[in-house]
Image (tube, helix red, strand yellow):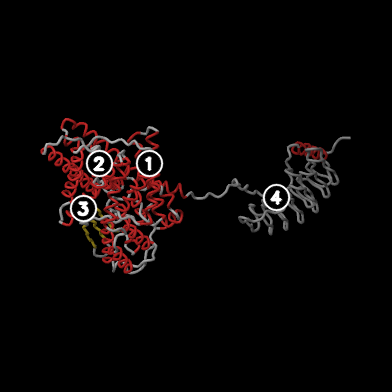
Amino acid sequence: MSSSPSDRERQERERLNTGSAGDGVAPAGSHDGTMAARGAAKPARNGANAALGAVKPGGGGAKAPLGAVKPGGGGAKAPLGAVKPGGGGAKAPLGAVKPGGGGAKAPLGAVKPGGGGAKAPLGAVKPGGGGAKAALGAVKAAGGPTKAARDGAAPAAGMIPRVPIPVVSPLLPPSRPNRAARNVLRRLVQGETPPTAPMNIVERLAGSPYANPMIQVGKADESARKTIDFALRLAETMFRYGAGALEVETSIIAVTAAFGLRNIEVDITNQSVIINYAHRDGVPITLLRVVRSWTNNYAGLVQVHELVTDIVTGGVARAEAYRRLDTIIKRPKPFPRWMVSLAEAVFAAAVVGVIGGSPFGMGVALLTILLAGQVARVLGKWRVPDFFVTAFTSFIVTMVAVVCFMVHVPLSPSMVVAGGILLLLPSGRLVSAVQDAINGFPVTASGRFLSAFLTFGAIVAGIAVALVAAAMLGGDRITVAEPIVGALPLYVILPLVALATVAICIAEQTSVRLLVPTMAVALVGYMAYYFGMQLGLGGRFAPALAAVVIGILARVIALRLGAPQLVVAVPSIIFLLVGLSIFRAMFVMTLTPGDSVTGAVGIFNALVVILAVAAGVVLGDNMARPLTRTNGHKDRRRNRRR
């Protein structure tokens, strides 16, 4: 049966539509009730079943396979992913695009191009239709109003939000500032204090017995003149009693700081003290005090040290300090004059025994010093300069040696002279001069060196005059500078050292309670010297070792007993006899022209020994500072707060 024209046309359209469906394109429009698969177009009527990928242009009731496009007809079911363009009541799968029809529901992520009341999921694009709502962040292409998502809103159901992954730092303990490293770095970076800037009181007092003074709050500037005058009087008293430049300076700074004056300037020479105080927006104050006399009074120096300590701790006001200083100055010395003269003679006799003299030689030295001491006291009353007093005393001692030699007394003349001039030798002054030079007082050290060498010159001059006078009287020339080597055993020397130390302490007017501690320090120092010589350290290094030991013990014991270090250290180093070698060298260089080179070498060696002894005492004092710092940590914290 031949096909009618209408049938041919329908077959032709079906063939064309079948070719288009294979490409997944729906040419037709939409009808209500149909379901469209994802990405497909179903344009035609109801009821037609198309093959996979085919387009069924018409007919009701036909079933389209999965992925097919059903162009028309009601009630047809489109598979998942198909696009159903029309038909009422049809259901579109998830992700399908339902282009038209009322009441159809589009899945999450689908694009619903038209129709009223349809809801677009989050992130979908809703191109048309009134009243449709666009999800957060979606783009609403056409139709009704669009709502944009806001930052930070919670995502809708079915969406996987992008959550930033937090960067987790490793669990480490919080860093703590290293104060020690910071302080070291600050010292390396910061420059030095300008040389003309006012001294820092706390730094200058660091390491001294008067560190961290208790500052008295009050009208310090209004009474600055009285405070400076008291400090000058205190410094003059300390100089007269034999204190060193460092002790005087630290005492001045500690007292003025305790009474409220900071940033002062102190200038100390051999016999004068200058204090300058310039307050901001005030009139500068400069006062000078000259020290014109000296005396041996270590007991008074101990009392001054106690007064300064009480002022620093805040227990004494300025008026009370004035009264106590006047009492110290007017207080009599602990030992009478006759006992001092006897102690000087005993000291000379004991030292003669230490250097190898016989008991007879010790007796001669005792009588010689008694005679010379009385002559020197008479000359002192006549206001004779010290140079001539020393020269006349050495003349008397040498004449005694000449007389003993002329009457054939079995005694070495050099032993008699050595025993007689021991008290005249400025051994302590030499050591103090070197200490001042080491501690930063070159002017004071130069003055003391000059004074010491003038004393040596006076001794040599007196001995030379006595020898010339003996030669004019017909006597033989004697040698008084030959070295003396001791031959006594140690158990005999140690009691002599103890006796000599106690005797020189009495001669220096040391406090009674310091006699035994000073004797103990001297014995320990001599033991160090003796064993150093036995070990072969030599005549230069062994005295330095003994001086270090004495410096350490003297600071520890003296500060524990409320006294300055030099009160114990100076009497304890006398047995090293640093002055005797200087005398021998100067005598050889002056009176024996043929041995001038030998004398010059002897002076150099003696100066080396003196420098070693003085440096050893200063080194020992510094080494003992940690042992005498009772509140070291608190002191450092208070220093940092300042």
Q: Quadrant of the N terminus?
A: top right
Task: Specify whether 7 is left or right of 532.
Answer: right
Q: Residue at x 42, y 55 (%)?
A: 560
In the picture of the structure, the residue carrying the numbered disc 3 is: 374
Q: Nearer the viewer, mark 4 or mark 1?
A: 1
SS of the residue under disc 2: helix
Q: CA distance from mark 2 to mark 4?
A: 113 Å
In the picture of the structure, the residue carrying the numbered disc 2 is: 418
Q: CA distance from mark 2 to mark 1?
A: 20 Å
Q: Residue at x 34, y 39 (%)?
A: 543
Mark 2 neighbour density, 10 Å: few (under 14) some (14–19) many (20 or more): many
Q: As shown in the figure, which amino acid type bears the numbered disc 1?
A: Val
Q: CA distance from mark 3 to mark 2?
A: 19 Å
SS of the residue under disc 3: helix
Residue toward you, 111 or 461: 461
Which quadrant of the view contains residue 170?
A: top right
Q: Are marks 4 and 1 in contact (CB under 8 Å)?
A: no
In the picture of the structure, the residue carrying the numbered disc 4 is: 159
Q: CA distance from mark 4 to mark 1?
A: 108 Å
Residue toward you, 485 or 6: 485
Q: Residue lying farthest top?
A: 594
Q: Position of residue 587 (x, y in %)?
A: 19, 37
